[in-house]
Amino acid sequence: MPETIAAVSPAGLAPEAEVYTRAFARVAVERTDHEPSRIGTLRKAAIDRFGELGFPNRKLEEWRSTDVRAIATTTFSFEPSAELVSEADCARFRYDNTHELVFVNGAFRSDLSRLQELPDGVIISSLEQGWREHPELIEPHLGRHAKFDNHAFVALNTALHENGVFVFFPRNAVVETPIHILHLGRGGDSPVASFPRNLFVAEENSQGRIIEQFATAGDTDTGGNHFTCPVTEVVLAQNAVVDHYKLQRESTDAFHMATFQIYLGRSSNFSSHSISWGGGLVRNDVNAVLGGEGCEATLNGLYMVGGTQLVDNHMRVDHVAPHCDSHELFKGVLEGHARAVFNGRIFVHKGAQKTDAKQTNRNLLLSPTALVHSNPQLEIFADDVRCTHGSTVGRLDELGIFYLRSRGIGEEAARSLLTYAFCADIVQRIKDKSVRRDLEEFLFRRLPQGDVVRQAV
Amino acid sequence: MPETATLVTDTELLEQHVAQEYKAGFVTDIEQDTLPPGLDEDTVRFISAKKAEPEWLLEWRLKAYRDWLEMKEPTWANIKYDPIDYQSISYYSAPKSASDGPQSLDEVDPEILATYEKLGIPLQEQKFLAGVAVDAVFDSVSVATTYKDKLAEVGVIFCPMSEAVQEHPELVKKYLGTVVPRNDNFFAALNSAVFSDGSFVYIPEGVRCPMELSTYFRMNALNTGQFERTLIIAEKGSYVSYLEGCTAPMRDQKQLHAAVVELYAHETATIKYSTVQNWYPGDVETGKGGIYNFVTKRGIAAGRAAKISWTQVETGSAITWKYPSVILKGDDSVGEFYSVAVSKGWQQADTGTKMIHVGKNTTSTIISKGISAGNGQNTYRGGVKILKSADGARNFSQCDSMLLGDKCGAHTFPYIDVQNPTAQMEHEASTSKIGEDQLFYCNSRGIDAEDAVSLIVNGFCKEVFKELPMEFAVEARKLLEISLEGSVG
């Protein structure tokens, strides 16, 4: 629909933003053959909305500590080559015994993916294939949970997404083999952008585990200049149980602006662990809507950043229905000039009685130049609730270090041990062995005298 | 109703509480020297001329006014109100009798004295009993100052701001606007342009102020915004405790109150500032009327080991927008904030504090207790900023909210920025209602529901009340009881 292009020349946008409207014109045409018309309309509304919003600036409350000008002023290529990546690049990120889907710069690579035999009715496919084969399963959910009215990056993803993952657990299905989705980014001479769009649907009484990994393929010195802007919608029906992990380990040159939108139905249980140690400018928006009575959401996270990395975790938990529990625990370790933002909002709606919401953010500063912005927030419109939040920022306990040193452990190793202990709180909560081992190995590598820590734990 | 109380359910108690009317509402009729509504440069000149102010102060006011014209009313606070028409407010009002400058209570308008009697301000008894000097501000001009001589003996200056401008211009010029700049924010700029009066306190080096200083503010003229400006300076090694208590008569038209309070503590000095605020909160049923309380309060602990402590009990006002803050500039300086905020009826409170750690080994403590009932909305908004230079800084924040009823709201927005790894910052917050098990426990021991709620709420606020000076604490507890009468006895 080339005639729509003129309508989308957003005033007030930097000239760099024009590439987004051009990309939209191309995507809009390419997608029309397999998507329902609602999605076409939605894409149009989203690019228009992006035109109005522009990139967020620091005057906006939600972005006051995160400056995205680096993204706004970069001209990205939207049709990156997916062929740059070979099996060898994938190998180090693979997890054994999983259903594995591999995406390179947002494009599905069936040749690199490994799908095992699936139980009856379970669907794990690319979103594009999902639209072709099961539109009736996607249609009720896609684009109905993640709102782009006030979020430029969700608007961009909604308008420009080309592919992604569709996971469907039918009624009573228990998927024992974890699903592993590997998103590899690979820049090069010019920076590339990708907009993966994922939809996970768990029907009544179903269970499963999903692992998402975001990484840079190959040489991170030359290929790290990529921008990933994923939007994931997760829908849990009554009694569904979903265990989710996200590892963000991209190159420190990479940009990552992710939105994760969860809807929990009655008595469902969702738990997520978000681990961030990569990326130069990383933002995770995690929004959970506790919409059915008696559901439970656990949203934990760990970030460990150094250099000039910035990681921003923006959490919002909406308690809509009564008798729901939510637990959030985010821990962070900062080195160098790193900056971390934690913004956690618990919103208890009218009528959401007997809510039990807990939110904790703990930060460990290891260098004098690191900076933490921690804004835990409570908004409560019901009276019979129990809501708490806690936030701490501090350094390693000098007495603890002294104790270890007095037992013959070197200072560096003592510091590493205490730092590991700080992270262990999250590490030990990870149920998936592969993810836990991966994270442990990372910590042993990252911490000075990691071998001492390895022996000790 | 002790016999029936045990049978009364929470909801009924709340209904009774919502029906509770404002107890201090009445209008005293005295002739006012009032400026017609409207604000322009001439208004500023008129106020300045009326007070025979020096040229530099007029200039300062005018600069503030011009800054104000450029500024926008802040919208980030979690409060809702109809737009304020700044041209419909009268910016100057003084009781006529004050122009003669009464020197003793005998010269004070008996009607004003009667007003104080009704409010239970023991202006006269205090002379004998509490030893409190009262600088009572009736509308915009101070009408009675007591114990001045006794304070003068030790060199303490405690007088209305307008008097300080005349008698101690060098001090006013040196400190005015140093803590809250004239263009600090929209309401502070407005205040700087048109401030009417307020208190001025100066404690010389090494002096421990012999008594608690106290000012009662009272708005009286219809449609008159009050723009108080208070400045307290504590020199090296001195100590002062200052009390501020407020109450206003009932009326329909919303009133704007945009005060500014500046505290300046030098090396090892201590300033303790306590507030009990009970302005008219608006009609309980409709939310009509009531005071808009948009206040800028800030202190600077400028010297080594200086200490500033804010304690506030906020039960009144339709809207409260207030963040008493401390800039901890001197090494080892201490900032404290203790607050109880009650919002019932249709009251909205967006209040909290800001602690800015600049110096080394600075310590701050924040204890905030919010109680929401009826349709009240209570927001804690606090900032803790630990700058790079603040090695070994320490902060502890605790904000607890209590909800009474299902139509009210409690919100917590702490902002925490830490730039120094040697700093330690802890924040915790909780929101809950009174536990049924707690009530049951009290009931089973023969304490009726209403007394039990009162007991629990008082316990909830105890940490803050214990920071108030003795006689003020009694008043605050009484105020809380009156405020929550019906639901919490």
Image: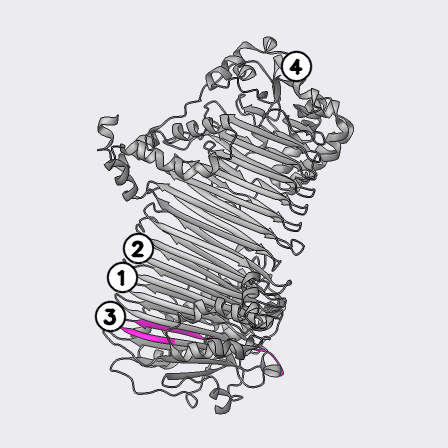
Instruction: Identify the amino acid type marked 1.
Output: Arg
> Which label sits on residue A321?
2
Question: The residue marked by circle 1 belongs to what chain?
Answer: A
Q: Position of residue B58 (x, y in %)?
A: 74, 30
Front residue of this view, candidates B259 and B159: B159
Mark closest to the chain's N terminus, 2 or 3: 3
Disc 3 packing (10 Å; few <14; some 14–19; many ≥20): some
Measure how far apart labels 2 and 3 are at the Cα level. 19 Å
- Whole-number angstrom distance, CA of label 4 to CA of label 2: 62 Å
Residue A147 visible, this orientation: no
Check chain identity for marks 1 and 4: say if they share one: no
**Residue A266 has which mark?**
1
Dot 1 and dot 2 residues touching (CB under 8 Å): yes
- Left/right of residue A110 with respect to residue B327 in the rendered view: left
Q: CA distance from mark 1 to mark 2?
A: 9 Å
Image x and y of residue A175, in percent: 29, 78
* Mark 2: secondary structure: loop
- Answer whether residue A80 is visible to the viewer in this image: yes
Local SS, label 4: helix
